[in-house]
Image: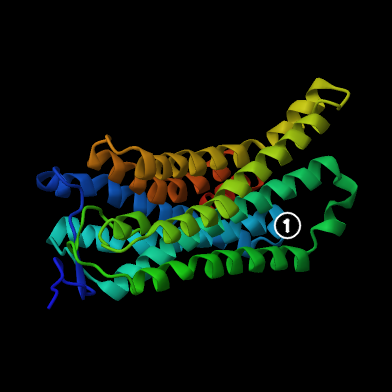
Amino acid sequence: MLTSNCTIFHHSTFILLGIPGLEAAHIWISIPFVLVYQMALLGNFALLIIIKMESSLHEPMYLFLCMLAGADLVACTTVVPKLLSLFWFNDREISFESCLTQMFFIHSLSTMESGFFLAMAFDRYVAICHPLRHSAILTHSVVRGLGLAIFLRGTLLLSAHPFLLRWLPYCRTNIIAHTYCEFMALIKLTCAETRVIQAYSLTVAFLTGGLDFLLIIFSYFLILWAVFCLPSKDARLKTLGTCGSHVCVILVFYTPAFLSFLTHRFGHHIAPHIHIFVANIYILVPPMVNPIIYGVKTKRIREKVLKFLFPLKS
């Protein structure tokens, strides 16, 4: 009778290690995490409230910004409460189903955020290259349709991940050297052949974030072409100024996203805590920074914030 060298089973729970090698400093590390999370909550809720209350801001650019703020809020809230429970109370256990759910939300929401950035780039392209047709092209029904399409794309393409991982055999360990559950961390724990699943994951990543990024670059190439055809320098600077905040948030989102993607798949000699810090920056920093960038660089939002904070001076 043949016996297997390993037992094939599904763990009922997984153990999150947090940041390996820095366990003694978890309490101190949690301080910036809490501050970043609080600022993300405050900033994104403020954006949603201001845009909701001000009818003059019910334009495609700000509606897409609302969708982005909503995705940012859910994404960071998916990660931070469990992370703080781990850091403060040493609550390392997470059920298998909760782990898969967390992984799905993290990856699907990241895909949605990428889609909203592309929609915002399309809005800037139409506003600059076809200004007279902007209101006719990006009607409220079109904006809602784009938002729904982005939501469905992120949901449907990433829904396969938890189902595929759910039926894999885990015969190694149930310890995840990370602060949260994500696709590559779980793949490393299985003893089955996963090349097809990883190929599917890479394909989805390219068809979503990768393709979005290429289309954003192409849209800005067309925008720059149109801008430098303008007759005066002042007109060129003013037009480019309308894109400044969008370019900043794109860089804030895609830079840690690509770093996290590359370090997980190709950075085998990079220290584990570097992997984890980059992955957490990718989840936490953009939701905090996006409202700040739009609040500082977008005049209409800045004016509404000042009016809300100092009503007697308005």
- The residue at the far left in this view is 24
Q: Residue at 15% x, 64% y: name it.
A: 91
- SS category of the residue bearing label 1: loop
Residue 156, position in %: x, y?
55, 70
How many neighbours does mark 1 have within 10 angstroms: few (below 14), some (14-19), or many (20 or more)?
A: some
Depth check, front residue: 166 or 273: 166
- Please name the amino acid that badge 1 sits on: Glu
Q: Is residue 314 visible?
A: no
User: Residue 138's quadrant in the figure?
Assistant: bottom right
Q: Where in the figure is residue 55, as x and y percent of width and height? A: 70, 62
Q: In the shown orientation, is residue 263 left or right of residue 243? A: left
User: Can you identify the residue that label 1 sits on?
Assistant: 59
Residue plotted at (73% across, 57% down): 59
The number of numbered discs placed on residues in the rendered structure image is: 1
* Residue 286 showing in the rendered view: yes
In-front residue for pair 175/241: 175
State whether residue 235 is above or below residue 26: above
Task: Return the residue found at the far top.
Answer: 233
Q: Position of residue 196 (x, y in %)?
A: 44, 60
Look at the image and tell me in which quarter the N terminus lies. bottom left
Say which residue appears at 54% left-offset and 65% top-offset. Answer: 157
Q: Nearer the viewer, residue 203 or 119?
A: 203
Asked whether 213 or 246 is in front, the reply is: 213
Q: Residue furthest bottom?
A: 1
**Left or right of 297 in this view: 280:** left
Q: What residue do we see at 64% from left, 57% from top?
A: 64
Q: Is residue 211 above or below residue 78?
A: above
Q: Which of the 4 image quadrants contains residue 164?
A: bottom left
